[in-house]
């Protein structure tokens, strides 16, 4: 009786072992294309170089999975994410002037208002809310009362762009949630960390050279701009740590308001991106590591 019982148990155990051995090995995950985020920095008219960067990526069929923008970078990124073709963005940029986004005013808080920027966004973007964009987007502004970043990923695009472009000392701060918002460049000159938070595997930062050595300031805006650029140099290591690749168009010779030199600025962006393109294509090679990370169960 006992022998029969142990025989039954042994046969059951052998059966379990055989089924385990015969079980086919799980297939290795297919290599996945890394998700790419582009982080566009600030720089007034120099930001038109971002158009050139985007042109080179489009020409080489490099898919952008998400975007982040600070200051003028938020304007270019927002227009592109909303579906405006690059040719149209460049055409609008050739014609843009101060009156399209700024209005001189008398105030203790600044020299001008950038309220017109919201109307500019309504006229040029193909979507007016983050939720309707074709590409996920983050826009960075600075909380003036608490000295921290405010990252917009939902709501009104016009308001977010205006806040991110509210250059302190020049433009009036923007009232928000019981406080005030100013240019995102104070806390994130190139919003690479915000881009990474959107779920990117590879983050490319586009940094505009806003400080030309030896250039004499000719206005209060020049003084403010140079002062901010000097301060931003101290924070540069922070955003560079979040970047896998940095593209740096040579634009320091251009003044902050030289929008009429649009085509030259676009060409500078193209040249910089072409130089870094081989490295980017290396980074974007499909890997099983990215596929495994996406399919791994939550713990």
Image: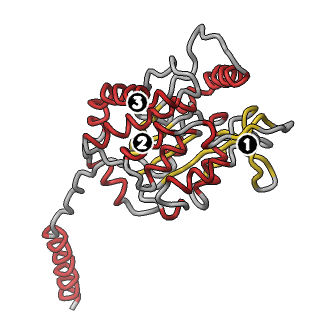
- The residue nearer to you, when weighing 203 against 19, is 203
CA gap, disc 3 and disc 1: 27 Å
- Left or right of 107 in this view: 266: left
Q: In the image, which disc is placed on residue 113?
A: 1
- Residue 147 lies, in percent from the top left, at 74, 39
Specify few, some or many for label 1: CA neighbours under 10 Å numbering under 14, 14-19, or 20 or more.
many
CA gap, disc 1 and disc 2: 25 Å
Instruction: Name the N-terminal-most of marks 1 and 2.
Output: 2
Task: Check the image and report above or below for 238 versus 20.
Answer: above
Q: Residue furthest top?
A: 214
Task: Label 2, secondary structure: give it.
Answer: helix
Q: Residue at x 42, y 48 (%)?
A: 200
- Residue 112 lies, in percent from the top left, at 74, 38
Callouts 3 and 2 close, C-beta under 8 Å? no
Q: Residue at x 68, y 16 (%)?
A: 218
Q: Quadrant of the rendered structure where residue 104 is?
A: top right
- The residue nearer to you, when weighing 51 against 131, is 51
Task: Check the image and report above or below for 291 versus 7.
Answer: above
Task: Label 3, secondary structure: give it.
Answer: helix
Is label 1 or label 2 in front? Answer: 2
- The residue nearer to you, when weighing 184 against 222, is 222
Q: In the image, which disc is placed on residue 91?
A: 2
Instruction: Name the N-terminal-most of marks 3 and 2.
Output: 2
Task: Label 1, secondary structure: give it.
Answer: strand
Instruction: Name the N-terminal-most of marks 3 and 1.
Output: 1
Q: Residue at x 31, y 25 (%)?
A: 275
Q: Residue at x 48, y 46 (%)?
A: 77
- Left or right of 224 in this view: 286: left
Disc 3 target residue = 263
CA gap, disc 3 and disc 2: 10 Å
Task: Check the image and report above or below for 1 versus 43.
Answer: below
């Amino acid at each position: 009786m006992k022998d029969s019982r142990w025989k039954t148990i042994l046969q059951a155990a052998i059966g379990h072992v055989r089924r385990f051995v015969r079980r086919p090995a799980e297939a290795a995950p297919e290599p996945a294309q890394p998700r790419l985020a582009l982080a566009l920095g600030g720089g007034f008219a120099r930001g038109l170089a971002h158009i050139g960067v985007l042109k080179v990526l489009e020409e080489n069929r490099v898919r952008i999975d998400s975007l982040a923008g600070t200051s003028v970078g938020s304007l270019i990124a927002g227009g592109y994410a909303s579906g405006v073709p690059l040719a149209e963005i460049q055409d609008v940029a050739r014609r843009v002037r101060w009156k399209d986004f700024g209005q001189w005013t008398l105030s203790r808080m600044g020299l001008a208002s950038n309220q017109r920027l919201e109307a500019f966004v309504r006229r040029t973007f193909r979507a007016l809310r983050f939720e309707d964009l074709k590409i996920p987007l983050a826009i960075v502004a600075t909380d003036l009362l608490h000295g921290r970043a405010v990252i917009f990923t939902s709501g009104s695009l016009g308001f977010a762009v205006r806040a991110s472009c509210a250059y302190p000392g020049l433009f009036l701060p923007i009232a928000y949630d019981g406080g005030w918002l100013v240019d995102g460049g104070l806390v994130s000159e190139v919003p690479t960390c915000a881009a990474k938070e959107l779920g990117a595997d590879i983050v490319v930062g586009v940094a505009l050279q806003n400080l030309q050595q030896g250039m004499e300031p000719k206005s209060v805006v020049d003084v403010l701009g140079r002062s901010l650029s000097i301060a931003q140099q101290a924070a540069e290591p922070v955003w560079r740590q979040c970047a896998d690749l940095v593209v740096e168009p040579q634009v320091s010779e251009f003044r902050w308001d030289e929008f009429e030199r649009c085509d030259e600025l676009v060409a500078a962006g193209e040249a910089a991106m072409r130089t870094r393109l081989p490295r980017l294509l290396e980074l974007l090679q499909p890997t099983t590591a990215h596929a495994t990370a996406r399919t791994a169960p939550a713990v």
